[in-house]
Amino acid sequence: MSNLTKILKKNFDASYHQQLILAGDLADSMNSKVYLVGGAVRDVLLGKSVNDIDLVVVGDSEDFADQLAIKLGGEITARSQFLTAKISFSDFSIDVASARRDYYPYPGSLPQVNLVKSIDQDLVRRDISINAMAISINRNTWGDLIDPMNGEDDLYQRKVRILYKRSFRDDPTRMLRVVLYSQRLGFPIDENTKDLIPKNLRYLRRMAGWRIFITFKHILRESDPHKILDEAHSLGILRSIHSSLELENVDLDQLKLITKFDGENSHFVMLSILVSSLAELDSKKLIRRLKMTGRWIRVINDTQSLKKLVKVMSAEDLLNSKIFDLLSNLDVASLEAMYLISDSDLVRSNIRLFLDKLRFLAPELNGDDLIKLGFPEGPYIGKVLKNLENLVIDGIVKTREDEVNFARGTLTDL
Ligand code: CTP
């Protein structure tokens, strides 16, 4: 068995390393066994930085998580039916789970969970071999690598391999995950694993949309999501999720443009580019199929609204205030996407002007100021403020004094 004490010390951020020591000590004091698992182990072995810590406890994980939160000064912010807890700190989090075995009553169902008494049993139920390793962090066994599925070998042989034949049937999102890790790490998909994909695609059709959506979000947050989508498309995975994701009409070259945008909204920009070539009805179907929520829906709807504005936006000599009115209610991510993909220079420059300048402009005066100037409370104040906003955006009114003069002028209209 390999011992990774040195690698842990070298590749783990010092503060995370200390947290692991404290977690191991706590487990010792509770007579439990605790392990670092999943992506953190894979990334430590690859010499990459680790941002998420997943711990698995053989023993009472709920009590362990409560005590660890107190010991490390974090807060339990989530618990799930699968005996997992999230401990959040100001800038990172630790997930704690019980060692468990999953049983899937039907393809793609949520698993029924049984606690198990060894980490090996927990690891063999996982998605791919390179994600199915654990490192012991109890003091006596600190650094021992537990690797029942030979993930370390696969890591060095650069292979993405599922662990058992029915894996995709149990959890069809793993077909997307296999592509995700293959593209992220540049590791080919193992031949046997690849052969199983076409045979299991049908299970994706029936799978709950919200679960696929979790993996979909994971993909859109990757640095090169277009490569993952491209490969998932070639393997027939996307169209098996929903016909609207056929992608025949999506210009994959456009998706590459996203790599030119690495702002915090990049996953939403990616989504917008992805759906920009879909017909409005298809984008609505996609929202329903994946049970999307919140800003994800807004970005899709705004992408469709923006497509309808392209003609108006191509007009020469548009007033800045007109550009503002057209764009100010739309999500920034759909605007950034249209900026990247539009082939009209005018549309692009108008969007850029709005994003970089116009959206930040506003009159200095507010409703209270107008009341102080003698305006009666009521809807007229809103109208004056809107006029002021237009004048500021068009650069006609430049100073607070100009604004007061303009407002006073309209008082006489009352
Ligand atoms: N896992 C799984 N099947 C899934 C999802 C997750 O077996 N459908 C297991 C894997 O062992 C995975 C771990 O749960 O390593 C955590 O999953 P996740 O947080 O999605 O990924 P990470 O491994 O942490 O990797 P990363 O966040 O870097 O993608």
Image (cartoon, helix red, strand yellow):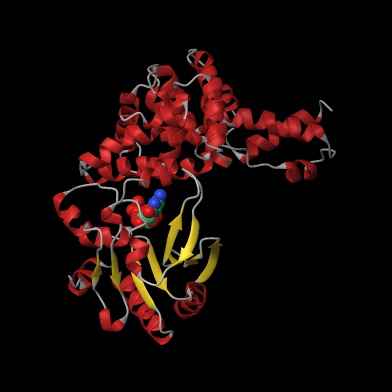
- In the shown orientation, is residue 325 left or right of residue 197? right
In the depicted view, which residue is nearer to us: 160 or 191?
A: 191
Q: What's the residue at 23%, 41% (across, down)?
A: 192
Q: What's the residue at 35%, 28% (across, down)?
A: 236
- Residue 62 at x, y = what percent? 51, 72
| Vertical arrangement, residue 100 with respect to residue 234, above or below | below
Q: What's the residue at 83%, 36% (across, down)?
A: 378
Could you tell me if residue 264 is visible in this image? no
Q: Quadrant of residue 231?
A: top left
Could you tell me if residue 407 is visible in this image? yes
Q: Which quarter of the figure is the C terminus placed in?
A: top right
In the depicted view, which residue is nearer to us: 101 or 45?
A: 101
| Vertical arrangement, residue 304 with respect to residue 120, above or below | above
- Residue 371 at x, y = what percent? 79, 43
Q: Name the outermost residue toward the bottom.
A: 29
Q: What's the residue at 47%, 35% (across, down)?
A: 333
- Residue 145 at x, y = what percent? 23, 69
Looking at the rendered structure, the number of numbered marks drawn on it comes to 0
Q: Which quarter of the figure is the N terminus placed in?
A: bottom left
Q: Quadrant of ligand 1?
A: bottom left
- Residue 194 at x, y = what percent? 26, 37
Q: Name the outermost residue toward the left.
A: 157
